[in-house]
């Protein structure tokens, strides 16, 4: 199942509202040690939904969110510790280079706070 994520730039991450309705969001990701990692603003709706309910679904996707693989069940957690943020920042810089640096710069101007989302297949 994990093979479908190899060499992909995006995953579509489906998180769930309290009502059970799924919300799909295409995101950049990195893979390390049997887990996927996403860098996002700590107060983003996807991070809030994950803190409420860690059950998620993921699939490799295009930048616009069109699935290019099979949806798989997973469990996600957030971690905004400095250790986690350093870890995810290093991984994202290696994979996405200057594009990621640009996003980080925009976030610094807005004084945004970030969190790492760790996704593990179930």
Image (tube, grey):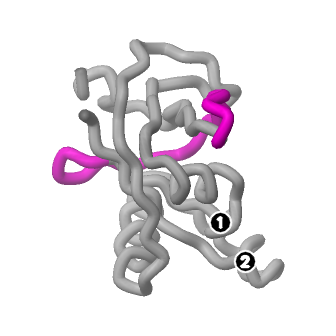
**Main SS class of the magenta portion in the image:** strand
Residue 27: give its label: none
**Farthest-out residue, front:** 19
30 horizontally vs 11: left or right: left
Q: Quadrant of the N terminus?
A: top left
| Residue 40 vertical position relative to residue 49 in the rendered view, above or below | below
Q: Helix, strand, or loop for circle 2?
A: loop
Residue behind mark 2? 112
Residue 38 is left or right of residue 99, and the answer is: left
Q: Nearer the viewer, residue 36 or 93?
A: 36
Q: Which residue is painted at 48% across and 37% down in the image?
A: 9
Segment tinted magenta in the rendering = 18-35
* Residue sitting nearer the eye, 98 or 41: 41
Counting residues from the start of the chain, the first of labels 1 and 2 encountered is 1
Q: Which residue sits at x=35%, y=73%? A: 87
Q: Which residue is disc 1 drawn over?
A: 41
Please indicate, yes or no, whether residue 99 appears anywhere in the rendered image.
no
Residue 44 within the magenta-colored segment of the rendering: no
Residue 110 in which image quadrant: bottom right
Local packing at callout 2 (Cα closer than 10 Å; few below 14, some 14-19, many 20+) is few
Residue 91 point in image, percent of width and height? 37, 62
Residue 101 horizontal/vertical position (percent): 61, 68
Image marks 1 and 2: residues in contact by CB distance under 8 Å: yes
Q: Is residue 20 rendered magenta in the image? A: yes
**Residue at horizontal 36 percent and vertical 47 percent from the top:** 119
Residue at point 45% right, 24% down? Answer: 59
Badge 1 marks a residue whose secondary structure is strand
Real-space CA distance between mark 1 and mark 2, rounded to the nearest whole angstrom: 7 Å
**Could you tell me if residue 91 is visible in this image?**
yes
Is 25 situated above or below 97? above
The x and y percentages for residue 114 are 59, 72
Q: Would you call the spot at circle 1 few (<14 residues within 10 Å), some (14-19), or many (20 or more)?
A: some
């Amino acid at each position: 199942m994990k093979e479908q994520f190899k060499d992909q730039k995006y995953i579509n991450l489906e998180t769930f509202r309290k009502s059970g309705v799924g919300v799909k969001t295409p995101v950049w990701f990195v893979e390390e040690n049997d887990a996927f990692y996403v860098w996002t603003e700590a107060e983003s709706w996807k991070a809030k939904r994950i803190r409420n309910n860690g059950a998620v679904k993921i699939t490799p996707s295009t930048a616009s969110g069109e699935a290019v693989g099979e949806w798989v069940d997973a469990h996600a957690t957030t971690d905004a510790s400095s250790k986690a943020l350093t870890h995810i920042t290093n991984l994202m810089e290696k994979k996405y280079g200057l594009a990621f640096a640009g996003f980080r710069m925009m976030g610094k101007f807005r004084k945004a706070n970030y969190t790492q989302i760790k996704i593990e297949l179930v």
